[in-house]
Amino acid sequence: QVQLVESGGGLVQAGGSLTLSCAASGRTFSGHAMGWFRQAPGKEREFVAGVTWNGGNTLYADSAKGRFTISRDKAKNSVALQMNSLKPEATAVYYCAARAYGIVLPTTRSYPYWGQGTQVTVSS
């Protein structure tokens, strides 16, 4: 059974930083692209960032470019999202996701495996 477990969420002031982590277990994720999505209250889940299985290529939503960094530790089967200069509009539940192919895609339907999410709240 595939398990993705997020951690690192919390409350931070605007301009601050947080690093989210996602630990994957249950199968080998070699060859799997992984991504971070977020869902704010009343809004659809949206893509934030993704990374290829070897960590060599990344993709970011426009809202994340220049401030967020996604990284992957293949040995630990984990992926992290470092978020800097956070804005109140970043407040959402953040989800880790994995797909069975190496290419990163920015759509929720491309990812069959999901974590439970971790809350990020940015106060103004």
Image: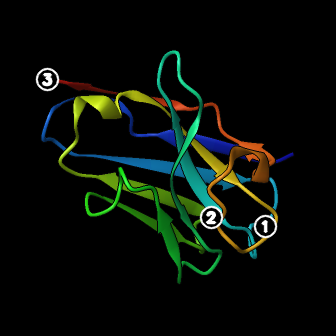
How many numbered discs sit on the rendered protein?
A: 3
Say what amino acid the circle numbered 2 marks: Asn
Q: Secondary structure at mark 1?
A: loop
Q: Residue furthest right?
A: 1
Q: Mark number for residue 28?
A: 1
The answer to which image quadrant residue 35 occupies is bottom right
Considering only order in the chain, which callout, 1 or 3, is on the residue closer to the N terminus? 1
Label 2 CA crowd tier, 10 Å (few <14, some 14–19, many 20+): some
Give the Cα distance between marks 3 and 1: 40 Å
Q: Secondary structure at mark 2?
A: loop
For image coordinates 87% across by 45% down, the residue present is 1
Residue 31 in picture, x, y percent from top left? 76, 76
Residue toward you, 85 or 82: 85
Q: Are marks 1 and 2 in contact (CB under 8 Å)?
A: yes
- Circle 2 is placed at which residue position? 77
* Image: 71 above or below 57: above
Q: Secondary structure at mark 3?
A: loop
